[in-house]
Image (spheres, rainbow, N blue to C red):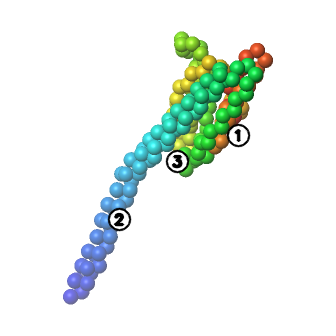
């Protein structure tokens, strides 16, 4: 009779051990999949935000052309402060010398501060683009007409 009591306890402990093993295996096996999905989601959001910024640069560029030399242009856009639960940075890279087409060419790079996720979106403008500071953060961004003495520029900064 004592053997039966031990069998129930041993069976219960074995079942708990098997369930714990299966649960930890599933969590360990699916964790990279979930992380990959999160990175893909952040990258897709960065591409959307990069296209929004590129569209705003193009809009500001057209407004400068229509406003003429004495006009003023100021365009504000609201970007989220965080994407995927983390802050991010926006940086413009001048690619004008690498491309043959007319105008100024830039790559807008958005990168996450924590997960090393990045997205790059190209943009073309008729005027040079300057950022103040060199690396922007998410949130309110302002594009305005700047004057660099002999040429007009588009200045992009956090507002």
Q: Secondary structure under badge 2?
A: helix
Q: Position of residue 48 (x, y in %)?
A: 50, 37
Element type at marker 3? Answer: loop
- Along the polypeptide, which appears first: circle 1 or circle 2? 2
Residue closest to the eye, 151 or 37: 151
Q: How many marks?
A: 3
Which circle marks residue 78 in the picture? none
Q: CA distance from mark 3 to mark 2?
A: 30 Å
Q: Secondary structure at mark 1?
A: loop
Residue name at image x 42 percent, y 44 percent: 36
Query: Mark number for residue 159?
Result: 1
Query: Which sits earlier in the primary sequence, circle 3 or circle 1?
Result: 3
* Residue 114 appears in the figure: yes
Look at mark 2 in the image and give the residue it sits on.
Answer: 20
In the foreground, 97 or 101: 101
Q: Which residue, given by chain and number where applicable, does mark 3 sit on?
A: 84
Q: Is residue 86 above or below residue 100?
A: below
């Amino acid at each position: 009779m004592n053997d039966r009591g031990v069998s129930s306890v041993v069976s219960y402990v074995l079942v708990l051990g098997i369930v714990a093993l299966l649960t930890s295996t599933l969590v360990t096996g699916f964790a990279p999949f979930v992380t990959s999905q999160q990175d893909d989601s952040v990258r897709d959001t960065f591409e959307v935000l990069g296209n929004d910024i590129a569209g705003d640069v193009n809009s500001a560029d057209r407004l400068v052309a229509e406003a003429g030399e004495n006009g003023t242009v100021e365009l504000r856009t609201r970007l989220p402060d965080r994407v995927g639960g983390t802050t991010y940075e926006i940086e413009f890279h001048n690619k004008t010398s690498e491309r043959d087409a007319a105008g100024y060419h830039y790559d807008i790079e958005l990168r996450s501060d924590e997960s090393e996720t990045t997205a790059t979106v190209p943009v073309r403008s008729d005027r040079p683009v300057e950022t103040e500071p060199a690396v922007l953060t998410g949130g309110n961004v302002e594009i305005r007409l700047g004057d660099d003495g002999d040429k007009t520029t588009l200045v992009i900064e956090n507002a």
